[in-house]
Amino acid sequence: MSFAILLKVIVINIVLSGDNAVVIAMASRNVPKKQQKKAIFWGTLGAIILRLLFAVAIVYLLEVPFVTFIGGLLLVYIAIKLLIGDEEENLKEGGTSLFSAVKTIIIADAVMSLDNVLAIAGAVKGNLVGIMIGVIVSIPIIVFGSQLILKAMERYPMISYAGAGILSWTAGEMILGEPKFEPFLTRDLHILVPTTITVLVIGFGYFINRKKTQ
């Protein structure tokens, strides 16, 4: 594998790992302070293992009908869940809140990793070694990125709405990325659908959170 292709893989990871870092930060923010690093570590480890498995199975996964559509819907649910997460419930769960955060991180990252692995597979022309290198390169980007975002969220809680927006937009793109829908899609829908999903998720989250505070 040439240096140019390796550089391309690194750039793809920098661009596409942002949403993964966002979901890790959002899932970890309600975990007790001393357990946040554990949530990031175990969540990322589980997500990376799944991503490696996806790297091997990506050709077969993409042949499953409606897999990206279902993945997009699941990501919408995760974005809403992270945005309106009940802090009191997390505190009542105590130690199990760490498990809850790790579970959410792994599920969300598994959904979003389809796009990441597919992009890397295209860059290295299906070379399995190149795909593996791309996945490994993504590890420090996700870990350090999620820690930076988490610190920003602790200081400015409203950032969580931006995070939910990123996840919602990604969900919209995944839904539109379903090959079965391709014959029916117009250029306008590629903007309209992600925008509508993002506005609805943020609006719903804001309404529920405001209702809680009242």
Image: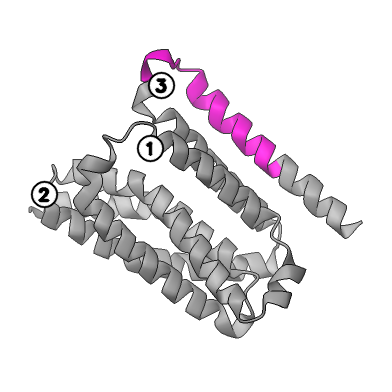
Does 192 sit left or right of 170 as displayed? right
Q: Nearer the viewer, residue 64 or 176?
A: 64
Circle 1/circle 2 CB separation < 8 Å: no
Of the numbered discs in the image, which one, if any, rests on residue 124? none
Reading the image, the residue beneath label 3 is 181
Amino acid type, residue under disc 1 in the picture:
Val
Amino acid type, residue under disc 3 in the picture:
Phe
Of the numbered discs in the image, which one, if any, rests on residue 127? 2
> What's the magenta region?
182-202
Query: Quadrant location of residue 17?
Result: bottom left
Pair 2/3: label in front? 3
Does 109 sit left or right of 119 as displayed? right
Q: Residue at x 43, y 75 (%)?
A: 41
Q: Is residue 139 above or below residue 134?
A: below
Reading the image, the residue beneath label 1 is 67
Q: CA distance from mark 2 to mark 3?
A: 28 Å
Q: Residues within 10 Å of mark 1 (few under 14, many from 20)?
A: some
Residue 59 within the magenta-colored segment of the rendering: no
Earlier sequence position, callout 2 versus callout 3: 2
Earlier sequence position, callout 1 versus callout 3: 1
Chief SS of the magenta region: helix
| Residue ranking furthest to the bottom | 34
Earlier sequence position, callout 1 versus callout 2: 1
